[in-house]
Image (spheres, rainbow, N blue to C red):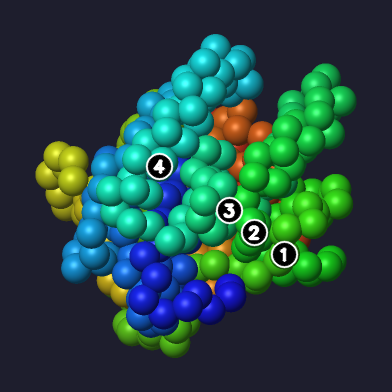
């Protein structure tokens, strides 16, 4: 990342489809603080709650949310198509809200993590994404290049595009950022993980399994219910990190401990002190696991083509095992 001039006012705007965009922007925010910039966080409710807990001293603004929901079944494409008007309205709305905030807060720079509308021609704007193209399901692969062109049009509205991955063959995102030519304003900056600097946290084992949940409903709850059912019938000592900061929480049982959210250092310690991680195959989660060199079972959200692709792409790494949600059987994977 380029060093911003000191004393600039920088607004950081992560997308709110799950918490991954918020967690991976934590090291960006910390870098901005270290460089003596004034940082303002603008995000939807759940990511804002998470980032408030990480940076309580910063200014926080609740930003428009898309309120996207996943399908209960295994095909998310048609669910997304039916919600396309929400996405379009959300892009226009966030662009207009940002314009007002730039004047009110005297913002010099805006950093958007996958928010299409958070650019402004009057200030410096930076876009973060690992997904230059969108993976399509079988039968619609011919639309992938068209989708890439649309995304590139939005990226060109920004001064810079940061791709959180390594350039070349040894990469994490595969086709998502390497299949097509990257835009002229884009560059690879290496993976972003909130666990950078915490790799050497080592303590005695405390849990058999740590389950880390994330993503839009109802799929987040569906996986949570599966994990509760399987862990309740086992002897595993389990902690479930629910990805629901600020919300009500189930009571702990003899075998399962529940937490809605853990601060970065505490989560790193919990992961390192667990024999096995179970989580979605979201890109931010994969970057975090790579940073901690931790073994995990990756469970793609059914029908979420990006997660299904990433799970296949990274499973050659000996850290990861990939399993479909309806085929999960923890007893067959534990102990590792």
For the question of whether residue 42 can be seen, the reply is yes
Q: Is disc 1 surrounded by few (<14), some (14 to 19) or many (20+) residues within 10 Å?
A: some
Horizontal side, residue 109 vs residue 52: left or right: right
Task: Identify the mark nearer the N-term, 2 or 4.
Answer: 4
Task: Identify the mark nearer the N-term, 2 or 1.
Answer: 2
Q: Which residue position holds label 4? A: 98
Q: Which residue position holds label 2? A: 160
Q: Is disc 4 surrounded by few (<14), some (14 to 19) or many (20+) residues within 10 Å?
A: many
Q: Which residue position holds label 3? A: 127
Dot in front, 4 or 3: 4
Q: Which residue position holds label 1? A: 187
| Secondary structure type for disc 2 | strand
Cα separation between marks 1 and 4? 25 Å
Q: Name which residue lies at 87% across and 25% down.
A: 142
Residue contact at pointers 2 and 3, CB within 8 angstroms? yes
Horizontal side, residue 25 vs residue 168: left or right: left
Percent across and percent down for residue 287 are: 56, 64
Tell me where residue 160 sits by quadrant: bottom right
Q: Is residue 226 above or below residue 22?
A: above
């Amino acid at each position: 990342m380029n060093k911003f001039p000191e004393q600039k006012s920088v607004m950081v705007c992560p997308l709110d489809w799950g918490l991954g965009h918020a967690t991976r922007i934590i090291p960006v925010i910390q870098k901005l603080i270290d460089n003596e910039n004034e940082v303002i966080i603008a995000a939807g409710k759940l990511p804002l709650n998470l980032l408030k807990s990480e940076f309580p001293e910063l200014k926080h603004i609740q930003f428009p949310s898309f309120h996207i929901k996943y399908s209960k079944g295994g095909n998310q494409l048609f669910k997304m198509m039916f919600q396309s008007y929400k996405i379009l309205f959300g892009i226009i709305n966030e662009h207009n809200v940002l314009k007002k905030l730039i004047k009110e807060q005297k913002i010099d720079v805006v950093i958007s993590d996958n928010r299409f509308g958070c650019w402004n021609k009057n200030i410096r704007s930076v876009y973060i994404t690992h997904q230059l193209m969108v993976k399509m399901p079988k039968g619609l692969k011919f639309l992938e290049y068209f989708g890439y062109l649309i995304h590139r049009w939005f990226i060109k509205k920004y001064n810079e595009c940061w791709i959180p991955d390594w350039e070349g063959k040894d990469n994490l995102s595969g086709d998502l950022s390497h299949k097509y030519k990257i835009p002229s304003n884009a560059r690879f900056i290496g993976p972003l993980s909130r666990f950078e600097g915490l790799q050497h946290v080592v303590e005695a084992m405390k849990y058999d399994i740590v389950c880390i949940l994330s993503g839009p409903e109802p799929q987040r709850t569906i996986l949570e219910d599966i994990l509760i059912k399987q862990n309740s019938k086992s002897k595993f000592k389990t902690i479930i990190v629910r990805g629901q900061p600020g919300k009500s929480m189930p009571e702990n049982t003899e075998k399962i401990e529940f937490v809605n959210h853990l601060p970065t250092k505490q989560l790193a310690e919990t992961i390192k002190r667990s024999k096995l991680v179970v989580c979605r195959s979201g890109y931010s989660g994969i970057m975090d696991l790579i940073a901690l060199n931790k073994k995990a079972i990756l469970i793609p959200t059914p029908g979420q083509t990006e997660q299904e692709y990433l799970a296949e792409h990274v499973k050659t790494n000996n850290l990861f095992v990939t399993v479909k949600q309806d085929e999960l059987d923890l007893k067959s994977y534990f102990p590792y």
